[in-house]
Image (cartoon, helix red, strand yellow):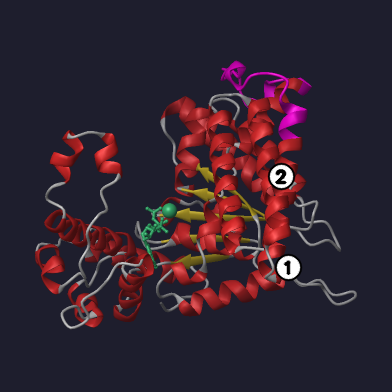
C-alpha cells in the first residue's frame, strides 16, 4: 500500500515517542508505558504497509523495542519517579528495596535516546578513514567467531578533541548502524542529579543495558564529558565522582563472558583528555582524536548543512571550495551555525512582512508560506569575513601533544 500511509504512521510513532518522553519526565510511568505500547502498535501497522525489506527489518526492530520498553515500564511503574530522594549516604551503604531498584530502572530508561535513528554516516562530513575503521571494528565485535577462537572488536573507545567536531555524531551513527539501544549519559549531569546514588545507578545502567541485549541487539553506553568523572570537585563531589567512575570501570571490566559476545559497548567522549587518569585510559583500548575538518571535509560539511537540508543554492555565485577555503579552523558546529546565519539573512530579506502578519493573528501566519530564494555568496560573506574561530592554535597543539603520548594511533580526517 501507499508510502503516504506508512509516512503518516511514522509520524504517529514519533508523536507517541515524544509523548512517552514527556510523561517519563513528569514521572507518569504507567502513562509512558501506554505511549510506548501505542508506538509499538503503530509500528506493527506500518509493517503491513512497508514493502522494502531493509525498511521492514528496521521497523520490526523498532516495534520490538517499543514493546520491550512498554513492558519494562509496566512492570516497574508501580510508583512515582518523584518519590526518589537523593540519599546522603554513600552508595555502598544504601540498602535498596526492590521498589527502589525498580525506580532506578525508570531513571535509566530516561537515558535512552532515539537521536541516532536520524544520524547516518552520510550526516557526518569528512572522517572517511575513521568511519571505515569504526565499521570494521564494530563489525568484528558483532560477527560470529570461528570455533575455538576468540576475536574481539573494539568494545570501549574514547573520542577526544575540540568541541563541535562530530564526536557525538559518530557515536550516534555507530548506534544507528548497529541498531543499538543508545544510552546517552552526560557525566556532569548525572553526578549532580544522582548525588549519593551514582555508583549504584551505574550498575543499574549496565544491568538495564545488558537486559536490552537479550534480543541480540547491542547496547551502547555513551558517556559524554567523561573527564568530569576524573576531576575532584570539593570533598563530597569528589566522593560521588569517584563512586561513579569506579562503578563504570568495574562494569567495563566485569562482564565479558567466555565464549559470548559482549553486546554492551561503552563510548566515551571528552574535550579534556589530559584530565583522564591512567585507570580510565587502560580500559579504553582506542583513543581517537576527532580534530578540525580539513578543506575537503569542510566542503562536505557545507553540503550536508545546505543541500542536505534542501536549501536552494545559486551555484553561479556560491562555490563550496571557496566557502571551505575561507572557513579554515572552523568546526562542524561552527559551519552549521554559519549556514543557519546565511539562511536567516536570506529569509529576513525575502519575508519582511512576517512581523506584521504575526500581529494579525495565528490563522494568518499559519496560512502564510515562507518565501525562499537560492543562497548566494553575499549571504555568507558578512559572516565569513567577521569570523573568529572558537578553537585556537594552542588548543589544537594540546590535543596533538596529548595524542602523541597517549593515543594508539592517529587517524586522518
Ligand atoms: N563532521 C561533521 N559533519 C556534519 N556536521 C557536523 C560535523 N561535526 C559537527 N557537525 C555539526 O555540529 C553539531 C555538533 O556536533 P557534535 O555534537 O557531534 O560535536 P561534539 O564533537 O560531540 O562536540 P562536544 O565536544 O561539544 O560535545 C552537529 O549536530 C552538526 O550539526
Ligand atoms: Mg558531544
Which circle marks residue 41 in the picture? 2
Is residue 115 at all visible to an observer of this figure?
Answer: yes
In this rendering, the answer to whether 194 lies above or below 348 is above
**Where residue 165 appears, x then y in whole percent?**
37, 63
The outermost residue toward the right is: 147
Q: Position of residue 21 (x, y in %)?
A: 56, 36
Residue designated by label 1: 142
Residue 66 sits above or below residue 32 on the image: below
Measured as percent of width and height from the top left, residue 167 is found at 45, 60
Q: CA distance from mark 1 to mark 2?
A: 29 Å
Q: Is residue 184 magenta?
A: no
Picture quadrant where residue 360 is located: top left
Please give the range of residues in magenta. Answer: 72-98
Quarter of the image with the C terminus is bottom left
Indicate which disc, 1 or 2, sits on the residue closer to the N terminus.
2
Residue drawn at the location 73% of the way across and 20% of the way down: 78
For image coordinates 54% across by 24% down, the residue present is: 26
Crowding at label 2, few (<14), some or many (≥20) Cα neighbours within 10 Å?
some
Which residue is more in the foreground, 292 or 403?
292
- Tell me if 138 is positioned left or right of 348 in this view: right
Q: Residue at x 49, y 41 (%)?
A: 187
Q: Secondary structure at mark 2?
A: helix
Position of 133 relative to 176 (above/below) = below
Q: Quadrant of the N terminus?
A: bottom right
Q: Secondary structure at mark 1?
A: helix
Q: Is residue 293 visible?
A: no
Question: Do labels 1 and 2 touch, CB within 8 Å?
Answer: no
Amino acid at each position: 500500500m501507499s508510502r503516504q500511509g506508512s509516512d503518516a504512521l511514522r509520524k504517529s510513532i514519533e508523536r507517541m515517542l515524544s509523548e512517552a518522553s514527556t510523561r517519563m519526565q513528569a514521572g507518569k510511568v504507567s502513562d509512558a508505558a501506554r505511549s510506548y505500547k501505542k508506538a509499538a502498535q503503530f509500528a506493527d501497522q506500518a509493517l503491513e504497509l512497508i514493502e522494502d525489506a531493509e525498511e521492514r527489518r528496521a521497523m520490526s526492530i523498532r516495534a520490538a523495542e517499543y514493546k520491550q520498553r512498554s513492558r519494562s515500564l509496566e512492570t516497574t511503574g508501580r510508583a512515582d519517579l518523584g518519590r526518589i530522594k537523593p540519599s546522603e549516604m554513600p552508595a555502598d551503604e544504601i540498602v535498596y528495596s526492590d521498589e527502589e531498584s525498580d525506580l532506578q530502572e525508570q531513571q535509566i530508561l530516561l537515558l535512552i535516546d532515539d537521536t541516532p535513528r536520524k544520524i547516518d554516516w552520510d550526516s557526518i562530513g569528512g572522517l572517511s578513514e575513521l568511519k571505515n575503521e569504526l565499521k570494521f571494528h564494530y563489525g568484528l565485535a558483532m560477527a560470529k567467531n570461528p570455533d575455538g577462537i576468540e576475536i574481539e572488536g573494539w568494545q570501549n573507545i574514547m573520542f577526544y578533541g575540540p568541541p563541535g567536531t562530530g564526536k557525538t555524531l559518530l557515536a550516534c551513527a555507530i548506534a544507528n548502524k548497529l541498531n543499538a539501544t543508545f544510552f546517552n549519559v552526560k557525566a556532569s549531569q548525572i553526578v549532580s542529579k544522582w548525588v549519593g546514588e551514582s555508583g549504584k545507578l551505574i550498575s543499574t545502567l549496565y544491568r538495564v543495558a545488558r537486559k536490552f541485549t537479550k534480543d541480540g541487539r547491542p547496547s551502547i553506553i555513551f558517556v559524554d564529558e567523561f573527564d568530569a568523572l576524573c576531576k575532584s570537585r570539593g570533598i563530597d563531589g569528589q566522593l560521588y565522582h569517584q563512586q561513579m567512575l569506579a562503578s563504570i570501570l568495574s562494569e567495563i571490566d566485569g562482564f565479558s563472558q567466555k565464549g559470548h559476545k559482549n553486546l554492551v559497548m561503552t563510548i566515551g567522549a571528552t574535550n579534556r583528555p589530559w584530565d583522564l587518569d591512567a585507570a580510565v585510559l587502560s580500559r579504553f583500548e582506542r583513543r581517537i582524536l576527532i580534530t578540525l575538518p580539513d578543506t575537503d571535509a569542510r566542503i562536505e560539511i557545507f553540503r550536508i548543512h545546505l543541500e542536505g537540508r534542501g536549501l536552494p543554492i545559486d551555484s553561479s555565485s556560491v562555490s563550496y571550495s571557496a566557502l571551505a577555503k575561507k572557513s579554515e579552523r572552523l568546526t562542524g558546529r561552527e559551519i552549521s551555525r554559519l549556514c543557519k546565519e546565511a539562511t536567516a539573512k536570506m529569509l529576513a530579506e525575502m519575508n519582511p512582512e512576517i512581523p506584521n502578519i504575526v500581529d494579525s493573528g495565528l490563522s494568518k501566519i499559519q496560512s502564510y508560506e515562507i518565501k525562499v530564494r537560492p543562497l548566494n555568496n553575499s549571504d555568507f560573506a558578512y559572516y565569513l569575513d567577521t569570523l573568529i574561530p572558537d578553537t585556537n592554535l594552542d588548543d589544537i597543539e594540546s590535543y596533538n601533544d596529548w595524542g602523541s603520548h597517549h593515543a594508539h594511533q592517529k587517524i586522518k580526517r
